Amino acid sequence: MKIKYDKQTDVLYIQLNNNTISESEDNKGVIVDYDNDSNVVGIEILNASSKLPQPNIVEYEMA
């Protein structure tokens, strides 16, 4: 998994795997990318700073 925030474009992208994207679905600036088997490949958040308190800070937790 990779998380990338681009401050210039204010876009946060969470890449879950390296599968090829075959379809994307946009819901109010949150875009979900799917592969051929309808598995989620990634999640893109447009205008991230207006949707998240600190899009450039990531906390990682494992249980």
Image (cartoon, rainbow, N blue to C red):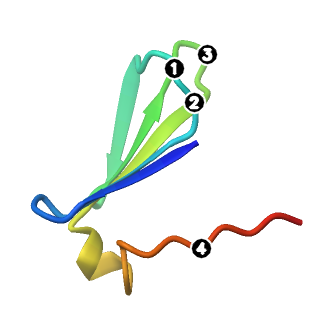
Q: CA distance from mark 1 to mark 2?
A: 10 Å
Q: CA distance from mark 3 to mark 2?
A: 13 Å
Q: CA distance from mark 4 to mark 1?
A: 27 Å
On screen, residue 6 versus residue 33, left or right, reads left
Amino acid type, label 4: Glu
Q: Nearer the viewer, mark 3 or mark 4?
A: 4
Element on which disc 3 rests: loop
Residue 34 drawn above or below residue 44: above
Q: Which mark is residue 9?
A: none
**Residue in the picture at 44% in, 75% down:** 57
Element on which disc 1 rests: loop
Which of the two residues, 8 or 46, is positioned nearer the viewer here? 8
Give the percent coordinates (x, y) of residue 1. Answer: 58, 42
Q: Do residues under tags 1 and 2 come within 8 Å of each other at their CB atoms?
A: yes
On screen, residue 59 versus residue 31, left or right, reads right
Q: Nearer the viewer, mark 1 or mark 2?
A: 2
Residue at numbered disc 2: 17
Residue at numbered disc 3: 37
**Residue in the picture at 61% in, 28% down:** 39
Residue at numbered disc 1: 35
Amino acid type, label 1: Asp
User: In terms of sequence position, does the residue under pointer 3 or pointer 2 come before the other?
Assistant: 2
